[in-house]
Amino acid sequence: MAKFKKRRIRRIILLGITFILSTIIIEKFIKIQNINNKQINISKEETNFESKSVNNINNIKSIILVNKDFGLEKGYEPEDLVEIEVKSNKEILLRREANENLERMFEDAKKDGINLLAVSGYRSYEYQNDVYNNEVYNNGKEYADKYVAKPGYSEHQTGLVVDVLAVNYTKMDENFENTKECMWLHKNIHKYGFILRYLKGKENITGYNYEPWHIRYVGTEHSLKIKEKDLTLEEYLGKS
């Protein structure tokens, strides 16, 4: 009888231990499942964000930020690229709406006796790769990274950027800012939906040295506000 009671007690204890262990294992399994589900949801959100960014860039009314931290897909190419018809030193492509406003700006500049010259517009990933590598080869990586974007991180790939100089001043250097053409440009570009992308004194925000010739189309809805508050695109979008 005593042996039977001992066996019964042992059985009860074993059942209790088994129950406790089962409970612990089930709880851990539930926690792991919750973590996995959370990770899946996060991954879905990230995927949606990425595809949303790609979709947005196809809509010219959306502002896309391209800099050293935010890039574009290697194969991205705007569908509405057109050849610009303003004075230029070569064949240059730009997105249609940006081009239309560039034409208006060049026409109005000419009325004021200002002769502007477009020298660069849309660049493919491959073209930008050549530009960057050539700059590194000629001037070293440290210098190149101050002025030239790596492939996939160049605003030129958006088709919304154009480098503008003067007919009588074709050097891409800071002395361009002393020309009457540059002064007119900086005073008026916002009226046509463009902004000066790399401002002087804000190199730590944009990641690039001051470029008085590099203008970016964002539309007048944004360019007027950016000009009024003297902001970089990073500051305007809260990404500085």
Image (cartoon, rainbow, N blue to C red):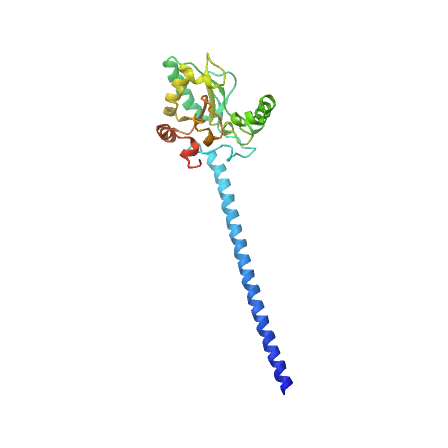
Q: Is 86 situated above or below 142?
A: above
Q: Is 16 situated above or below 68?
A: below
Q: Quadrant of residue 3?
A: bottom right
Quarter in which the C terminus is drawn: top left
Q: Is 49 situated above or below 227?
A: below
Residue drawn at (54%, 57%) of the image: 33
Residue 193: image x %, image y %? 39, 26
Residue drawn at (51%, 52%) of the image: 38
Q: Is residue 85 visible?
A: no
Q: Is residue 42 visible?
A: yes
Taking the image as shown, residue 31 lies to the left or right of residue 202, namely right
Quarter in which the N terminus is drawn: bottom right
Residue 171: image x %, image y %? 50, 16
Residue 103: image x %, image y %? 42, 20
Residue drawn at (59%, 21%) of the image: 138
Give the farthest residue toward the right.
3
Looking at the rendered structure, the number of numbered marks drawn on it comes to: 0
In this orientation, which residue lies closer to the viewer: 27 or 111?
27
Q: Quadrant of residue 128?
A: top right
Give the farthest residue toward the bottom.
1
In this orientation, which residue lies closer to the viewer: 169 or 50?
169
Residue 46: image x %, image y %? 51, 44
In this orientation, which residue lies closer to the viewer: 3 or 25?
3
